[in-house]
Amino acid sequence: MTNEPKHSLTVECTVNGERVRREVPARRHLADFLREDLELTGTHLGCEHGVCGACSVLVDGAVVRSCLMLAVQAHGRRIETIEGLSDSGALKDLQTAFIERNAAQCGFCTAGMLLTAHQLTASGEAMTRPEIREYMSGNLCRCTGYHAIIDAVEAVLRSKSRTP
Amino acid sequence: MSATVKDDAVIGKGFPRKELQRLLRGRGRYVADIKLPRMLHLAFVRSPHPHARIVDIQTAEALASPGVVGVYIGKEFTDSEPLVGIALHRRGHKSAPQYPMAVDRAVWQGQPVAAVVAETRAEAEDAAELVQVEWEELPAITSGEEAVAPDAKAIHPEIGDNLAFEHTISVNDPEKTLAQSHIVVEQSFRFERQTGLPLETRGMIADWNPGDESLTVHYAHQSPFQMQEIFSRHLGIPPLKIRVIAPDVGGGFGIKLNIYGEDLAVVMIARRLGRPVKFISDRLESLVSDAHARDHDIVAKMGVSAEGRITSMWLDDLGAVGAYGMPFRFNVAEGMMCITMAGACYDFSSYWGRTRSVYVNKNLVGMYRGVGIPLACIVTEVLADKAARQLGMDPADFRRLNHRRKEDLPCVTPNGSQLDTVSFEECFEKVLKLMDYDALRKEQADLRKRGILRGIGLASFVEATSYGPPYYGPSQASISTQDGCTLRLEPAGVVRCITSLTDQGQGTLTGIAQIVAEAVGLSFDQVEVMGNDSAISPYGGGAWASRGMAVGGEAALNAGRALKQNIIALAAAITQNLPEALDIKAGEIVNKESGAAVLSVAELGRIAYFRQDTLPKDADVQLSVTRSFADNHKHYYMANGIQASYVEVDEATGFIKLLGHWAVDDCGRIINPLQVDEQVRGGVVQGIGAVLYEEFMYGPGGGLQNGSLVDYLIPAASEMPDIHVAHVETPERTTQLGAKGIGEAGLIGAMGALWVSVNDALQPLGATVAHQPFTPERVLLAIKAAKAGR
Ligand code: FES
Ligand code: FES
């Protein structure tokens, strides 16, 4: 056997507000854990190299690429995915703005886009369009040309920075 | 009074897509998301060499690996009919037969040689590493030049040489016309290999049911019917036993239209095991096995009169199309489109063009957005700028003088492009205004004095959309160029629509809903559309050649009108009116003259399905209709457009900064401007990616050196400009809807405009960059060469 020994470990964490406990192989990354073990398939895999951002989730409130984090590293932490953040209404303004402007075509990149945009708009800090582009540039989209995504993020950011 | 007709218009409005509600909440269902009972996972073992003989394969160790259910090698699958990717009407087009996996020799790096099936993908991958292949490396042919060298060894000795296809066009004494031209400009071009790279990789689940010997394939694919046909023919499964379903698909761009030999292996293995088998390629696999595109060397010339009129074009294309012919869509397409569409926007009558497609030890070239038209556009526009400059003309004036005029339409260009409802002049004047051309030229001149290199590029182009029966029919590929639409009025007065089209994010299904709503007389929300399923929809083509609205839309329009007629006939019987006196608006059956509501469609639905007892005895209730559409003799609907780009080149670093981009397009009647604009923008950015970043890099022996997104670069938000989009709307004359396609325009024009603008920026240095992508290194080399040549 050339295989590494298949350690299984217990992971206990909160996912979208629910406590979960699973045995997982040590080498399983968080994205596979979410998609395969928990069947939360809204988190997508576009590269598994940490480049495209399609697999973005929130870990303890920060955007993380779930293809670069092992499931076991999620032990004791709070994970939020596109499903949970949609159901809680946290992404509502962004989702409305994205839909109005057709800022998603195939939708494969969109969970990651929304999560990054969520982090960007959360502070309500004013940003120029090039700054928004820069901030969003870790998330790749092959369909939209980005223009509509930047429009949507800009609009939500504006409305946020207006409300004190 | 009901609303006026104009207010009821649904076509032409920018409705957002309904499916986004699902996709944006993480509730899409892409093929990788689907799990079936007892499903297994497949991983391929791929050739690490561009060309090598398989001396031996040992699978015992892999078979003993945990979770493994089966290991298969290429020679187990030679009993099925191999794929042969040739177009039968292209004389001399040849290809070696291709089996699902390599049998005794691998001819490209990435070709599958074995498949491992296990309980989980991870176990399948572990075991794949245990498959021991003994290779004998063979010399690889790695470029088009090498492939056609006189002493080149044929990759497939059984077809004689490496020339897949050659075609020459010669019209109106091109040699002489060129020789007599006031000036002749010439340029050679190099286009590196790239791919379409949908963010979702290719994937499928083949679900064989041993009970009734039926096959269901959940497939990230653009054409379920095409694949039903292929599985039936190559696996001997009766078509009625096959169902191909495309779930949500994460982008296609042509890549998911092609026919991949390895996909046949997945289905064959599922059949042997009698269990569902899932294959999801990872990014590396997708990069080495998804259809590649481009890889062309072109030399071209343009003859121009002293007044600045183009007299003639000359174009020699060499395309390195990989190791086999790509089945059904054919590896001749890029080259043929290039030589037939070059110069299409300009008025000249003498032409010589040749294309050669040649086999090399690389992955197959297949369909990718724009196919060969971007090459035609680039070649023409670069030469046009060169000629203008040599004559001391402004490039815009040069184009204004040479554009084909409306009064000369319809016409056929010397190289065979059919132009009818194109609008070169209108698009051109519109883009100049939109970008404020004169002001930009002035700014450019001012900045040049300070040593800042800015460039402006204009590119007129055609986009042949909806390739039709005369194109595919004679090739004898079983590709349906017609599309169908079924409508069913539900008791609630709403319509369910089933189209043969597929949607990978373009907004096709939304456009169909709009057409149906308007044709029947309903609101947008009263129509629900589904597609993507070969067992359910009327037969049809799917998504390719930007045909959704033009072909499938026309079928939907016809179906909607027919259903409306049936509803009105029934309403007339129920309400004792003459059918001619009735109309339907926003879900109400109204009196045509007074506009007064007579009966709601919902009430009619209730009566039609649940209270037939109240109807006259002979009332004919036909509230499901199907219509199909194809124009039997139309090659394509020719759309057109123009784009402009404004860039700055940094002389010290070779970096190119995009400052602005403008696109004016004429796709005929616009069904949904929101979707159309985003098709253009998405295409523009892919075009920019092609010109600036995207390239497969190969080592000296032909080995691929960049197999991940870390080093195969695609555009990110920060490098992209804002993209200003405007339209000219010249409806297609031969259809009732008047729509043409829009899917490829963005990419075609962007590539042309960017090639021209970068070279315009380099003018003060006398440098020309003509090797795509324009990496900083290539830009610096061009600058260096120009300086050395002075
Ligand atoms: S899949 Fe994680 S960054 Fe691409
Ligand atoms: S919408 Fe398809 S990748 Fe972004």
Image: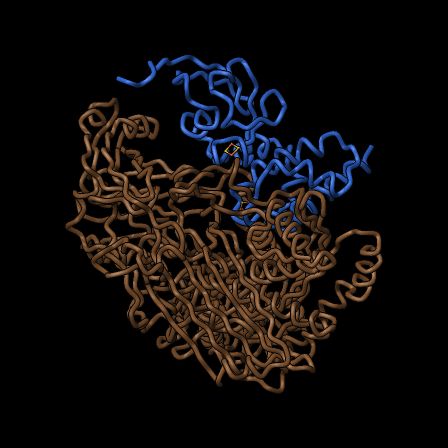
Q: Quadrant of residue B168?
A: bottom left
- Quadrant of the image containing the N terminus of chain A: top left
Q: Where is residue B431 shown, x and y percent of the image?
A: 71, 67
Q: Where is residue B660 shown, x and y percent of the image?
A: 72, 55
| Above/below status of B234 relative to B378 | above
Give the chain letter for brown: B
Q: Where is residue B563 shown, x and y percent of the image?
A: 45, 71
Q: Is residue B491 visible?
A: no
| Above/below status of B213 relative to B188 | above
Lateral position of residue B391 relative to residue B700, left or right: right
Between B455 and A160, the residue placed more toward the observer is B455
Q: How many marks?
A: 0
Q: How is the image coloured?
A: by chain
Between B289 and B388, the residue placed more toward the observer is B388
Between B22 and B520, the residue placed more toward the observer is B22
Q: Colour of chain A?
A: blue
Residue extending farthest left: B79
Q: Quadrant of ligand 2?
A: top right
- Quadrant of the image containing the C terminus of chain A: top right
Q: Where is residue B25 shown, x and y percent of the image?
A: 55, 39
Residue at 42%, 56% (x, y): give it: B531
Residue at 43%, 27% (x, y): give it: A32
Residue at 53%, 79% (x, y): give it: B419
Residue at 24%, 61% (x, y): give it: B160
| Above/below status of B177 relative to B236 | below
